[in-house]
Amino acid sequence: MHAIIHPIEPFDSTIGTNINFTWQGNQIFKVRCMIKDNYTGDVVYDQTISTMKQSYLLPPDSKLKNGGYYIAYLSVIDVDGSESSFSSIGTPFYCYQSPKFHLSINPGDVIKASSYQTELTYTQAENELLDYYSINLYTYQKTELLTSGNLYNTESLTYLITGLENAKQYYIRATGKTLHNMTLDTGYILFTVSYTEAQIFNPLELNNRAELGAIEIKSNITSTVGIPEKDVTYIDHEFADLKNNSVTYDIGFEVKGDFTKAFLFYKPERNARIIGFTDGQKSYVNIYYREGTLSDSNGEKAFFELQAETTGIKYILFSNYVTFPDTKQQFQLHLNRIGNTYEINVSVVNQTERR
């Protein structure tokens, strides 16, 4: 009779591991572990420990080397000193240095948008390949909200997180496996979401000037005239049809400093540029309308892509996903700028909700 060793996942020899096994026989008193080099057949480890468990703790000073391929054998010794036989076929395993497996979000980070494209870093000293990874989002109570599922394309280790709510805390966690089944886990990483939400302000402010016997009216409304590329066609005497046209605002309309802007429109052309503004030099923002089915979109959805260059830095930002509007609905796009950072969020509203 011999002990049956469970499969041994690759591990870092400087950390050690538990070798689990199944045994049917007399009560366990001691367990002997013998390990051979798979290529030479030389015994590189042979130690006996006192335990009553069906598990052998291989210590970090076993003198095994990372990058090695070994075969393990176990025998069980009872209280009378009787030792079981080794299995004729040992259990093979690899030793690898622990990979670097990190997310771009660190504990305590503050995310300043409702969407965030997280990046994953994976490196391993012996060039053990990453087989797949998964990224999961949780509530503060660690209830799962979003999962990427197992992603086997390891060329680009990125994943877009959407639907983050302002002033809330979340956990994010990445797990994975290497080609030889080494388990990877970043653990739960707590972060906070804080961004400026679009506000709707009254355009007029009324103040009672009793000393003058009058009402003071203040307005933040600035008159501006759009210059069309060509004659504008109107729909229902209310909407401008700009599918094959554009309107430029450059008088009485400035985009500077921090701001929140809202845009209402419907039936945009797929992959068309919807909004663009520039300082006339190197800084610019262009927003495009996109449609598609992505790994995390749960079917075909609409979303918007913001491309920006400011202070010499170029970047791309994606909005959240939304369902396609019906004939009585339209897109409401919110754009925030804080410093040189943009936030973009979209929703679908009924046309009667326009404001």
Image: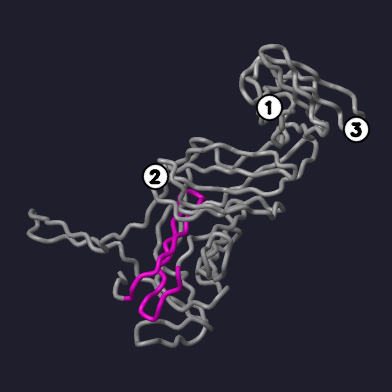
Q: Earlier in the sequence, mark 2 or mark 3?
A: 3
Name the residue beneath numbered marker 2: 168
**Viewer-nearest of discs 2 and 3:** 3
Look at the image and say whether residue 59 sits in the magenta stretch: no
Please state which amino acid type lies under the numbered disc 3.
Answer: Tyr
Magenta span: predominant SS is strand
What is the number of the mark on residue 39?
3
Separation of marks 1 and 3 at Cα, in angstroms: 22 Å
Residue under the image location 77 percent in, 41 percent down: 128
Name the residue beneath numbered marker 1: 17
Residue under the image location 71 percent in, 34 percent down: 8
Q: Which residues fall within the magenta stretch?
A: 323-351
Q: Is the Cβ of the residue at disc 1 closer than 8 Å to that at disc 3?
A: no
Q: Nearer the viewer, residue 17 or 50?
A: 50
Q: Quadrant of the C terminus?
A: bottom left
Q: Nearer the viewer, residue 112 or 11?
A: 11
Please state which amino acid type lies under the numbered disc 2.
Answer: Lys
Q: Quadrant of the N terminus?
A: top right
Residue 189, position as x, y percentages in the image: 52, 38
Q: Earlier in the sequence, mark 1 or mark 3?
A: 1
Q: Secondary structure at mark 3?
A: loop
Q: Residues within 10 Å of mark 3 (few under 14, many from 20)?
A: few
Where is residue 37, by image quadrant? top right
Q: Nearer the viewer, residue 82 or 21?
A: 82
